[in-house]
Amino acid sequence: MLKLSRFLFACVAVCICLTAVPACSLHSALLSEQEQLVKRDEFIAAGGYSVAGSYEIEVVSERWLYDGNALDTVLLAPHKQGKYPLIIYLPALGESADAGRLWREYWAKAGYAVLSVQAEDIAKAFADLTPDPAEKQQRHQGIFDVFGGEGPLDGAPEHGKNQPAQAMLDGDRRYISHGFFTAESLNRRVGQLSWVYRQCQQRAQARQGLFGKVDPTKTLLAGYDIGADTVTGWLTGSETDGVPIQPAAAVLLSPIVAASSGDMRQRYQSIRLPLLVIGSDQDSDRYGITTPQLRKFIWDYAASANKYLLWLKSARHGLFSGSEWAAPGRGEPGNEGWRGGPGGPPADFTSYFQGQGGRHGGPPGGGMGGPNRHAPEAMPAAYQEIGAVLSVSTAFLDSIAKSDNFAELWLRQNAQVWLKSVARLTAN
């Protein structure tokens, strides 16, 4: 009888929570990857930037060696013969070269050769912190545990009996990550990037395999997390191994900006090429290095005559990985997940029960109880946030690498109207 009472109490609690959360339909959380892709494309079609064409793509993976270090590479390029602008993409700390596929595949289908590069030591930075299968099973919680307070959503900060272990794990993660954000590490990473660029030049000139489709004279740099830090390091004049890179533009996804990095104004004023910085007010990390507001400083101080700031309203750090549609939870840089973050309850708790948005990208409906004028504004669905990043970044790349006047016009005149429920786009 006691168990039945507890079960009924839990059911009532779940129902109350569901009716209290804005846009509480479970439909969005249960969408398959293909369904989310369709929703994303519908969202982009309703006012987003439409690319000129959609190419079938090819892929080749290789391991390169530089100065005794293994560099894993994944190259995507259109199947159709031709020369395509090159995007060199650098993933996050703890990610492999296969990460960022949502960004990379979209850019490649839009007519770019996209080379993802990751050093083995950076990819395996947190390998020793991965829980064993038994521990993962213990951490996996059902819906009763979530609402009963005995466990977190998968990927959220641990509470209750697992809290001390999680705190120790977070401390180890911070300790390890700080070793990758030193000046010495930055110079080494920038040197690797410079060497990779030279390899791309040589392989393109020799028409070696898929590199025969690469146009190295139109090179763009893109990075996420520590990858963005590497790109920023090159842009601000760190050592380049004697090989000058002359990129046409740079895209920084959730860049790392440390408060202890000295005179940031002077450092970032040396950035003069076209620049797109992407982040969010909820874009914190577990490295204990930066904050959402610090990430903006690169855009604030850059002397670029052509710079944009895409600031999403509710995206967590993990979304900018571009690796999965659903909340990653395990395996994400910092192991943050989209549903949780440092301090407080799971940050994307509402989106876990969120309804689908309309074709015009507006906030989802009122859920089971209908619209509630007293409820807080519903958070955008993940496919809307991903669509925003894809649309704005591709328009930015096209405006630079392809001199597409329509892309620039869309960025400066039409983008903000379309983005209003999801993000803010600021141009200098």
Image: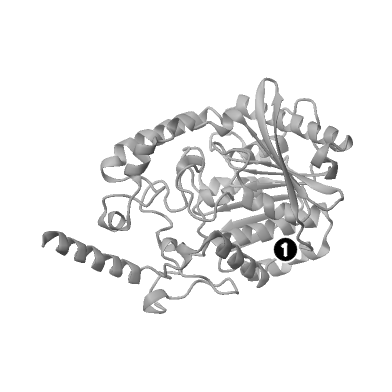
Residue, x 56% and y 58% (percent of image)? 312
Name the residue that disc number 1 marks: 411
Where is residue 281? Give x, y as percent.
51, 54
Where is residue 409? Give x, y as percent.
77, 66
Q: Does any portion of residue 351 appear in the rendered image? A: yes
Furthest-top residue in this view: 68
Number of other residues with Cα within 10 Å of mark 1, as a class: few under 14, some 14 to 19, many 20 or more: many
Identity of the amino acid at label 1? Answer: Leu
In front here: 214 or 158? Answer: 214
Horizontal side of residue 324 vs 159, given as left or right: right
Horizontal side of residue 176 vs 160, given as left or right: right
Quadrant location of the C terminus in the rendered image: bottom right
Disc 1 is placed on an element classified as helix
Colouring convention used in this rendered image of the protein? one colour
Q: Above or below — where is 368 with respect to 340?
A: below
Horizontal side of residue 165 vs 287, given as left or right: left
Q: How many labels does the image show?
A: 1
Residue, x 48% and y 37% (percent of image)? 287
Q: Above or below — where is 307 with respect to 264?
A: below
Residue, x 81% and y 52% (percent of image)? 401
Furthest-left residue in this view: 1
Quadrant location of the N terminus in the rendered image: bottom left
Residue, x 34% and y 68% (percent of image)? 18
Q: Does any portion of residue 238 appear in the rendered image? A: no
Query: Which quarter of the figure has residue 38?
Result: bottom right
Where is residue 31? Give x, y as percent.
50, 64
Where is residue 228? Give x, y as percent.
63, 41
